[in-house]
Image (cartoon, helix red, strand yellow):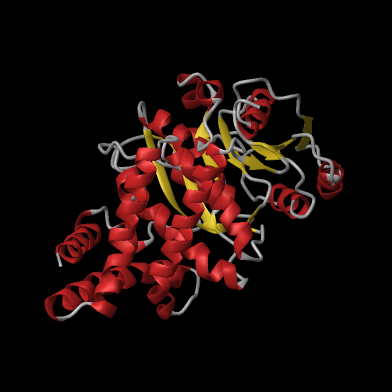
Amino acid sequence: MILTIVALLIWVYLYALHGRFWESRPELAPAPPVAALAVSALAVAGAPVDIVIPARDEAGSIGAVITSLLAQDYPGPFRVLLVDDGSTDGTAAIAREAARGDPRFILIEGHAKPAGWSGKLWALGQGIDAGDAPVVLLTDADIAHDPNHLSTLMARLETPLRGARLDMVSEMVRLNCESAAERALIPAFVYFFQMLYPFARVNDPLSATAAAAGGVVLIRREALERIGGLAAIRGALIDDVTLARRIKQGGAIFLGHAALARSIRPYPDYRDIRAMIARTAFTQLRYSYALLALTIAGLALVWLVPPIAVIFGGGAERLFGLMAYAIAVLTFQPTLRRYHLAWYWGLALPLIALAYMEATIASAWRHATGSGASWKNRDYGAGS
């Protein structure tokens, strides 16, 4: 009974006082190029933008990504800098073909990663150093962009947020959600991210909460230079959140959902999504087994106690469990609607949470056995 009451109180707090994370907002509305130009003196001049893409073995997606970026209708000058991080599948050749000789496309052959850098940050850093535009867009090699996306991002960057000048704009792009595994686990991934980093708090200049979604990060070069560049976070595995925290220490940031960008990377079955989660889950816990134990206990309390009380409890305990379970299902609905899924997927949240708990434990096991984090057939971490 006591555990059920505690679980209910936690859900009441999450619903009413945790930054309204469950609303799955805000979403950047498309801004026409004229609006992007009109919001500030910098934008009126058509601020140059460097678009930097780190890529390693992305033959399946890079052509569509390059095509979508070169088709941006942004009225200012921009360049697309692709950093090929030792690809062996023809990524560079496919990118060149997609660019069709466009002079705005620049291919950079990445150098060997020095010790102390994560692979992605080293690739990004080389692309940033190769450019000189006052604004930089960092984006992944599996994200396709609507032609109006860059204009929309710039319009947001150049519009003050609660009177504060923005230094960084980031978006959670629409993830692929076609396979059965994706429908079961991808909306929950977004939901859990919103719960961990309520967007309203991230976007509040007075709140210490900071986060970003690494697939789309638009940032002022001067803000990067202020923190010492990517070298200041070179060993970070959760680089997007780490970057957001450093930037927010000296400026305002914005995090929202993307209407104009989507991931085209498929996750056809459960093991693919499990690998994505396990790659950095234990890093989130700062490699602490004590935090792992507390996290698993907390997740069990929040996600498993209510349905167990509904099934096996009686009287007031069943009622409290049903109330907590109902709040959980209710808060999942806006995210399910974002992914065009039926409401009853919310009933599966306890089972979905179990899958995420297992992946988190697997992440800790990989660390304990020395396999560490890996991505694209290489060590992902800083020490490699």
Tell me: residue 277, above or below residue 222.
below
Q: Position of residue 337 (x, y in %)?
A: 44, 72
Q: Who is closer to the viewer here, 174 or 155?
A: 174
Tell me: residue 348, above or below residue 136.
below
Q: How many discs appear?
A: 0
On the rendered image, what quadrant is the C terminus found in?
top right
State left or right for residue 12 relative to residue 37: left
On the rendered image, what quadrant is the N terminus found in?
bottom left
Residue ID at (75%, 49%): 62
Q: Position of residue 318 (x, y in %)?
A: 19, 77
Residue ID at (64%, 50%): 73
Q: Position of residue 124 (x, y in %)?
A: 64, 32
Q: Who is closer to the viewer here, 20 or 162?
A: 20
Tell me: residue 157, above or below residue 116.
below
Residue 160 visible to an observer of this rendering: no
Residue 207, by quadrant, is top left
Q: Position of residue 130 (x, y in %)?
A: 69, 24
Residue ID at (32%, 46%): 294
Residue ID at (40%, 39%): 289
State left or right for residue 277 relative to residue 92: left
Residue 249 visible to an observer of this rendering: yes
Residue 285, by quadrant, is top left
